[in-house]
Image: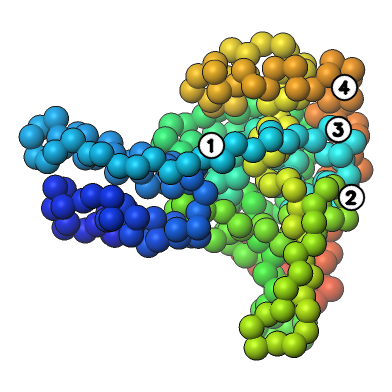
Amino acid sequence: MLLHFGTTRLDHIGQQELDEAYKAILTKGAQASGATKIRAVLTPLRAVLEFAAIRGWCSKPAFARPKVKQVRMQFLRPAEATALVEAAAPHVQPLVIFLIGTGARMSEALELDWKDVDLRGKRAVVWQKQDDERHIDLPPVVVRALESLEWRTGRVFRPLRSRKPRGALRGKEIGEAYHDTGRTGGGQIKTAWATACRKAGLPGHDRIWIPKGSNRQKVQFVPDLTPHCLRHTFASWHYCIHRDLLKLKEDGGWHTITMVARYAKKMPETYRADVLMWLAGDKLHAPSSAGRNVQNWCNAGFPEILSSKNKAL
């Protein structure tokens, strides 16, 4: 936002300038959701202008608030969560398990560094969008998933890139980090997520179109669920186990009881035993070998290069 507005005078920032900021700052521009516009642009801009207005540097800001579409809150039952994890690509499995088991936001997970992870103490520190640190407990299934990863420095979760490393005849390589959007958008695991949801039999629809300059029809599966639904899953499971909204608020990093009250009674108590078994790691088979599967996948294409890379890590 600072780069966009630069030296623009505060009293010259109005609705038109705000609309231009949406286009320039957000990944999806003017097509971004109302919630994203409010969180990433309107709220911080309004805070700056109100701070200035109190000191007489500009007039009090007045902006149109983007409409926020009310959507049905979706979450997974334990069996669906298992199907999703086992259908996911090996390099994505630990990330999906982490999101379900901790309730971390996608941005918090993708920015997680190994220096903030204590496997022995079963704790991790993530940074919230308000720049507040949050200490999260790691259930056994998450600890096992993290232990399966080969590297112990830098970013915990890394992408698998479809390109040949130098000297390799074929294969993929493990990147250093996912693309940083500055928390202004998502989509870092869009393709892997859609593929996993389709293979797991989760609901969605086919998007059919003809790309520009082509005569061939293209079909792409678009899942009804988004990765953020895993945060809803964590919250629904948490309340099913503890029946304590205050504890859910603290453990999940929400600011008010009102924000977590919607999760109450979403998950029937019938599933409590299944949820506990899932978090203990008794419902999954793939996670314990997820890290090795990633290595095996890559080794098939460039064993010597990957071996030297692991030594560097």
Q: Nearer the viewer, residue 183 or 276?
A: 183
Q: Nearer the viewer, residue 101 or 227?
A: 227
Q: Earlier in the sequence, mark 4 or mark 3?
A: 3
**Marks 2, 3: nearer the viewer:** 2
Residue 56 figure quarter: top left
Q: Earlier in the sequence, mark 1 or mark 4?
A: 1
* C-alpha span from label 4 to label 2: 20 Å
Residue that extends furthest to the left in the rendered view of this protein: 56
At label 2, which amino acid type do we have? Gly
* C-alpha span from label 2 to label 3: 14 Å
At label 3, which amino acid type do we have? Pro
The C terminus appears in which quarter of the rendering? bottom right
Q: Position of residue 145 (x, y in %)?
A: 77, 42
Look at mark 2 in the image and give the residue it sits on: 201
Look at mark 1 in the image and give the residue it sits on: 126
Look at mark 3 in the image and give the residue it sits on: 78
Query: Helix, strand or loop at disc 3?
Result: helix
The reply to whether residue 86 is visible in this rendering is no
Q: Position of residue 296 (x, y in %)?
A: 84, 64
Q: Earlier in the sequence, mark 4 or mark 2?
A: 2
